[in-house]
Structure formats: C-alpha cells, structure tokens
C-alpha cells in the first residue's frame, strides 16, 4: 500500500534527522501550529495529503525525544524493532481484552509476563497488567492493594465502595512521585490524608522514621527517585511492614529495571519481598509510548479488582484474559512492543543498555564536576542533578543549553536547590553524544559565570 510506504519513508527520514536537527522543537514550526486552527473540514482530503500535512506541520514541532541527546524528564527512546513491531500491531488492530478473541496478542502478553518476572527476579506467579504508564500502573496495583487490605478487615470494596469502610493507613515517602499521590486520590484514598515519612539527603525514605503501621495499611516505597535515582532501603522497611500486616507497593517507574542487571541489581535488593510493583516500559525498556506494567503478587487480588463479567463477553477460559488485570476492557496490544524489545535485546542486551546509560550518567557527572559545577546527587543510576550556581544562574544556563539545540535537559528544584536534571535513558545515546552534550553544557555554564 503506497500510503504505508510513504508513512514508513517519512518516519525513517524523521528518525534520521534527529541526529542533525535541534533537539528542541523548531520555533517557527511551533508558531505555524496556529495555522491548524481552522473550522472542521467539510470535504474529504486524500490520505496522502493528510500524511504530508502531518509531516509538514508536526514533525518539526516535535521535541527530539526519540533521538540520542534528549535527557529531559525520564524518557526513553524507542528501539527500532519496537517501532516496527508497533506498526505491525497497529495493522493487526487487535482489541486485546480477551484471549478467545485475540489469541496471538494475548499469548504474547503472557509470554512477556513470564520473561519479565524472570528478568526482574520477581515472584514468578505474579499477575501483570499491561497499562499506559507508571501512573496507571500505580493506580492498578494500588486498587488491588486497597481492596485486599480492606477485605482482610471484613470490608468488600468491589461491592460496597468506600462509604463506611474502615480507614486505611497510607504511608508514602516525602519524595514520592506526584503521580503516586494522584493515583491514591483517584482511588478515593486521598492525596493529602497520608503519612509522609521524612527522607535522607538522596530522597530515600528513612527507615528510622517509619511510623507504627497497623492494619489495614499500605506502605508505598520507591525504586528510583525521579531526581537522584536513589532507592529506598527495602529490606528494613518491608520487614517492618510485613510484621504489621501492611501491603507494600513499590513505584519503580524506571528503577525497577536495575534488577535486570547483575551490576545494578544490588541497588534494588529486597524489593522482591513487596506485594506489588509498578514500572514503565516506555521509559527505560525503550518501547514507544504508551506502555506501563503493574505487577501484583496475589493474582486473585488484582483479578478481583479489575475483572468484569457480562453475558456477551467470553467467559474465563483456560488462558489468561488480559482485561482481567487492567482498568480497560478494550485496548491496544501493547505487549507486542514489550515482547519485541525483550526478544531483540535478550537478557544480556538489556543489562548492557542499562549499564551503558548508567556509565554515561557517571561521565556527565564527572565532566561537569571537573568543570567546577556542583553535582547535587550521588549518581547511583542514570540520573544526574547539576547546579550551575544560584537558582537564577542555573535557570539561565539551562535556557541557553536548550536554545543551543545540541541536547535537551530540564530544570528541577530538589531538596531546596535549583538544578538541571540529566536522565540518560535511551538506547540511542552513544558515548560521543554524551561528549558533545557535555561540551555544550560546560560552555553554557562557563559563559554564565
Ligand atoms: C518514580 C516515578 N513514578 C511515576 C512516574 C509517572 O510515570 P508515567 O508518566 O509514565 O505515568 C514517573 C515519571 O517520571 C516516575 O519517575
């Protein structure tokens, strides 16, 4: 089909351009977006023209997130095989809610579940929901947590909701990700009625400050602080929670992947004793947006929070029904790209990608420190926070770096200090990209002095 050939040609040209174009969106292209504000089209437009129109207007107005020198937020690229697998899966257009209706797409999720549990060394009979991202993965796992801890207190949330339910004690770290709070809010557990445990200088929850837990309770821990990349001290915290009968959930949006490398796994030691875990595949696994993973040790807890039954829907068969584990009934077959990434890299390739990104983060820290700038975090994973001086100067330097276009990194305020966050999360980043970016960062940093 000529249209698909055209799309593939345009996509390839776009990806190739990322090595030479500015990482930030082109300002003229952003201004041109106003031209899209027209009344609803009354007449059809030929498909080829629609595609050309999208490419002309949107491609230059994108941020080069898929490229090798994007270090903002925590955003992976997309391994080429996962982009290609995504196209194929889009052509299949499978609604992967039910195994009976979409056996191929459902089976690929089941195989990926098994592979992931082995790679991340989590309990092998965990249930897994393929969701849109870590926010929804946290939401999904915490729905199972909420229902399970209340069930143990004699309350059936699925049937009766939260009205009149015993209060659930929710404990989070002072530096938990804001989307975790959003998930708790969406679950009716409140964004504010939480106990926030103080953290140390790296953002790790302080085990000596953990309050007394009493049933029903949920303790939310973190693998990979969004600024520092630090990990909570799991063994002590989980032991205390276990004793009190609390459910332990781990937000490991990117840090959970450390478990797939022998070198990095000690950082995440002990988290396998938790009850549920959330991570992103669209971050460090480098699959296209959107893709998140919700793992729950007690498969029945997740199934009873998420499954539905209806006359017209296929009944539970011998095989896993994907929609029994996710908030959505209908959704795309996002396990396809996860499977493609795991098959293409294998365990060794996966570990190499994570270890390479961590070494690149250390190189950023070392280069910036040598140039006289302060590194605000202990660089244990793929995250670096650097200060170029006071808040105003740091912001100005970040603006200059973004304007230059060689690379892109964003601002943060962490533990009272303004810094630039560098997150090295892409398969595409080569060591020479780090050197090129470092040179620009140092030049902009010195120019502001
Ligand atoms: C620790 C942590 N949790 C949750 C999230 C939210 O992830 P998503 O945007 O994929 O929903 C992030 C995003 O950076 C994160 O770093």
Image: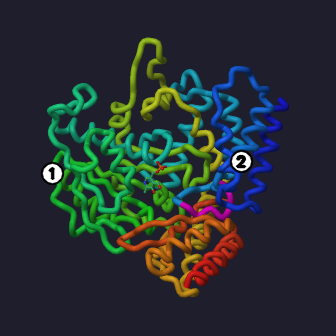
> What colouring style does the render use?
rainbow
Q: Secondary structure at mark 1?
A: loop
Circle 1 residue: 214
Queried whether the magenta region covers residue 337, the answer comes back as no
Q: Quadrant of the N terminus?
A: top right
Locate residue 45, reporting x and y percent: 76, 26
Residue 150 appears left or right of 226: left
Circle 2 residue: 59
> Can the viewer see residue 53 in this picture?
yes
Locate residue 167, reporting x and y percent: 16, 42
Residue shown at 34% from the left, 53% from the top: 274
Locate residue 128, reporting x and y percent: 45, 41
Q: Nearer the viewer, residue 437 or 358?
A: 437
Question: Is 308 located above or below residue 83 in the figure?
Answer: above
Judged by depth in the image, the label closer to the viewer, 1 or 2, is 2
Q: Residue furthest right?
A: 2
In the image, the segment drawn in magenta is 66-72
């Amino acid at each position: 089909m000529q249209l698909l050939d055209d799309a593939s040609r345009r996509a390839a040209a776009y990806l190739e351009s990322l090595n030479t174009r500015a990482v930030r969106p082109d300002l003229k292209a952003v201004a041109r977006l106003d031209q899209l504000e027209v009344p609803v089209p009354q007449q059809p437009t030929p498909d080829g023209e629609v595609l050309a129109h999208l490419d002309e207007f949107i491609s230059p107005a994108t941020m080069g997130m898929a490229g090798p020198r994007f270090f903002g937020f925590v955003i992976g690229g997309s391994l080429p095989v996962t982009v290609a697998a995504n196209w194929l899966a889009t052509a299949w257009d499978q609604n992967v809610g039910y195994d009976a209706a979409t056996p191929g797409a459902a089976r690929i999720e089941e195989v990926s579940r098994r592979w992931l549990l082995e790679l991340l060394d989590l309990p092998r009979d965990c249930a897994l929901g393929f969701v849109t991202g870590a926010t929804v993965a946290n939401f999904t796992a915490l729905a199972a947590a909420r229902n399970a801890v209340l069930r143990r207190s004699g309350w059936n949330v699925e049937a009766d909701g939260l009205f009149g339910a015993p209060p659930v004690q929710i404990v989070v770290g002072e530096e938990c990700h804001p989307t975790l709070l959003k998930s708790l809010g969406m679950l009716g557990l409140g964004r504010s009625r939480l106990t926030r445990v103080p953290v140390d200088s790296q953002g790790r929850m302080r085990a000596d400050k953990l309050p007394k837990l009493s049933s029903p309770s949920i303790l939310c821990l973190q693998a990979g602080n969004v600024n520092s990349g630090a990990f909570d001290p799991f063994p002590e915290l989980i032991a205390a929670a276990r004793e009190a009968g609390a459910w332990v959930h781990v937000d490991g949006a990117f840090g959970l992947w450390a478990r797939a490398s022998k070198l990095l796994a000690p950082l995440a030691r002990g988290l396998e004793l938790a009850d549920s875990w959330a991570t992103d595949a669209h971050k460090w696994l480098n699959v296209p947006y959107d893709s998140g993973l919700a793992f729950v040790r007690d498969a029945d807890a997740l199934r009873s929070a998420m499954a539905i039954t209806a006359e017209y829907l296929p009944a539970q068969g011998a095989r896993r029904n994907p929609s029994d584990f996710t908030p959505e009934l209908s959704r795309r077959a996002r396990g396809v790209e996860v499977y493609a990434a795991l098959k293409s890299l294998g365990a060794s390739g996966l570990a190499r990608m994570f270890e390479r990104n961590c070494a690149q983060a250390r190189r950023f820290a070392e280069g910036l420190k040598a140039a006289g700038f302060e590194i605000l975090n202990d660089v244990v994973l793929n995250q670096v926070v650097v200060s170029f001086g006071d808040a105003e100067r740091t912001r100005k330097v970040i603006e200059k770096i973004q304007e230059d276009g060689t690379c892109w990194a964003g601002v943060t305020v962490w533990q009272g200090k303004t810094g630039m966050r560098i997150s090295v999360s892409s398969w595409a980043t080569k060591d020479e990209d780090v050197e090129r970016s470092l040179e620009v960062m140092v030049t902009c940093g010195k120019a502001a002095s």
